[in-house]
Image (cartoon, grey):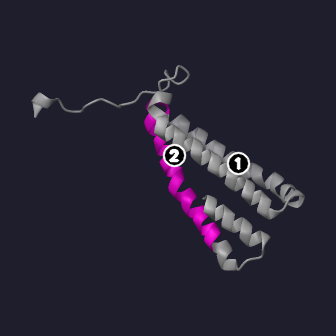
Amino acid sequence: MDIGLGLCGAALEYHLHYRVLIVGIYLCAFVVLLMVPICVNYVAENYTEYASQAAIAIGVYRLGWSIAIPFFFKEWEKAVSVGWVLGTATFLNLSAGILIALVCWKGPQLRRLPLVQGLVHTEEGQTTLRENSV
């Protein structure tokens, strides 16, 4: 996604060939189509009793941003430039990606925190068959 946003920003800022813009848009669309189901599945598997509410919250969050961004994008682009707008989006996306990687890496430790302790019902460590029954 960061490469795609960077390519889109560079193509629009420096008037590069339209194929550079197409590759950037393709990369952004590919990553969105790839990552959204993975993120929703991760949340649904960790919050099994609240899976539908978690999926709704993610959907509302995505819809809210997709509606809100066009309201300030043109003014922001006029103030700085399209390259800076998409460059900032790249850095914000990179920061969010680092946070997601941290949650995936330290997820079991984070789910033990008192804040989320009552929400999480994980099947981690459970077995479906007993050793003597086979």
In the image, what residue occupies the spot 65% across and 43% down? 61
Q: Which residues are magenta?
A: 23-50
Q: Are marks 2 and 1 in contact (CB under 8 Å)?
A: no
The three-letter code of the residue at mark 2 reads Cys
Quarter of the figure with residue 54: top right
Residue under pointer 1: 65
Instruction: Note whether 22 is above or below 82 in the view shown.
Output: below
Q: Position of residue 45 (x, y in %)?
A: 43, 38
Let me know if residue 36 is in the magenta part: yes
In the image, what residue occupies the spot 57% across and 57% down? 32
Instruction: For label 1, count other residues whose C-alpha is less than 10 Å away and answer few (under 14), some (14-19) or many (20+).
Output: few
In the image, what residue occupies the spot 35% across and 31% down? 123
Magenta stretch mostly in which secondary structure?
helix
Considering the image in quadrants, where does the N terminus appear?
bottom right
Let me know if residue 118 is in the magenta part: no
Instruction: Note whether 7 is above or below 43 in the view shown.
Output: below
**Marked residue nearer the N-terminal end (2 or 1):** 2
Where disc 1 sits, the SS reads: helix
What is the CA distance from the residue labelled 2 to the residue labelled 1?
17 Å
Instruction: For label 2, count other residues whose C-alpha is less than 10 Å away and answer few (under 14), some (14-19) or many (20+).
Output: some
Query: What is the number of the mark on residue 7?
Result: none
In the image, what residue occupies the spot 58% across and 65% down? 27
In the image, taking residue 2 as reference, residue 55 lies left or right, namely: left
Could you tell me how many numbered marks the image carries? 2
Quarter of the figure with residue 115: top right
Q: Position of residue 20 (x, y in %)?
A: 66, 75
Residue under pointer 2: 39
Q: Position of residue 110 (x, y in %)?
A: 50, 29
The three-letter code of the residue at mark 1 reads Trp
